[in-house]
Amino acid sequence: MENKYQEENENDYIIIPNPIYDVVFRYLMEDIDSAIIVISTLLNVKIKRLHLEPLTHAEKKPKPIVSSIKEPNTKDDIQLFHLDFTAVIELPDGSDELIMIEVQKASEPEDIFRFKRYISKNFQKKQSREIINPNTQAIETIDMPLRLVPIFILNFRIENEIDDLLIKTNHFKQGVFRNRNLEKHNEFIDNLTYDILVVQLPNLHKISPSEYEGDEYKTKLYALLKLFDQKSTVNNNNEHRLKVMRRLLPGFLERVVLRLQAADSNYPDLEEQMFIEDEYLKALIDRDNKISYLGAKLEEKDKALVEKDKALEEASKMIANQQQIILNYARQLKAEGKNNIEIQANTGLPLETIEKL
């Protein structure tokens, strides 16, 4: 009876590879239908067409040896995981827009500072477009910048002010004198600014049902991000698999879940790659701990030097004050009619100094 009850409980769950791992997430997002579900849910937009840029997503090549890890600023061989997509989305007025979507994922806070170079690079990408020259009526091809939408999926918090699961920036276009907003899409302005989305996975359990129930977008968004719940690991000593309750999975995520479940059979080296990522992250953590330790030691040394300099400065001031007191005393003795020999005997000052007083 107990075994039957246990079996029924286990059947309430499905097991999926942990999509926080690069190898799993990349496999998921290489399926365009799954990628459309993930990205459209995050952005809350209708995606008509989506294309993964094959040469822009970088695969980490982790090595378990700490000394092999280098920093990007020093011509390193570490590449951050990121996927670049071009998408045709439907705007609220029914028109289409071609945009670039950049999905970046990080497990360590230090990674977000390295993301800047990828954003800067993609911000400069352009699209070719045919227009009619109003003067000649001839069709001409011009280059126009693509609007960039960066999405960051972070396995750590970057703010503790509101502890939200998804942070989104919203730029708005406003006239200064008339104080009115431009509601329509404007290619020149919109393509020169971009909004960002930042997912903070550790805040998943801080969101209560009352904060998403009754809102279709938030409900779907929460259900999607539950697939990344790092507190749902099957084994405390192994974070490679997550347990997800079947009843919490809405129908629109079926394709995504099936794709994740297929990763094990379609990717023979999946487990090995996940272990390599573990070693990679461990090496980074060990390196960062060493840097922190050396930094703390250097800070202690600098603090000791500062305190030493401060003590020397105070001693110097004290000596100067004492010297001034002695000089003042010598002047007083001189005013009282004492000769230089007597003043020297009382103050210890050189005769040359006394003579100049």
Image (cartoon, helix red, strand yellow):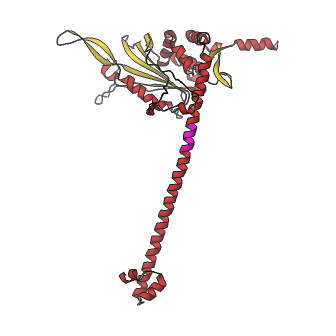
Asked if the magenta segment contains residue 312, the reply would be no
- What secondary structure is the magenta-colored segment mainly? helix
Q: Nearer the viewer, residue 93 or 67?
A: 67
Residue 214 visible (yes or no): no
Residue lying at the far left of the rendered structure = 136
Query: As displayed, is residue 227 above or below residue 345?
Result: above
Going 68% across and 26% down the picture, which residue do you hit? 237
Rendered location of residue 185, percent (x, y) = 34, 18
Q: In this image, 152 relative to 94: left or right?
A: right
Asked if the magenta segment contains residue 291, the reply would be yes
Going 49% across and 59% down the picture, which residue do you hit? 309
Rendered location of residue 261, percent (x, y) = 61, 11
The quadrant in which the C terminus is found is bottom left
Rendered location of residue 266, percent (x, y) = 59, 10
Q: In this image, 156 relative to 136: left or right?
A: right
Q: In which quarter of the image is residue 224?
A: top right
Residue 120 visible (yes or no): yes
**First to last magenta residue range:** 288-294
Q: Nearer the viewer, residue 350 or 357?
A: 350
Query: As displayed, is residue 256 above or below residue 348?
Result: above
The quadrant in which the N terminus is found is top right
Going 47% across and 67% down the picture, which residue do you hit? 316
Q: In which quarter of the image is residue 50?
A: top left
Q: Which of 28 and 290 is in front in this view?
A: 290
Rendered location of residue 11, percent (x, y) = 70, 11
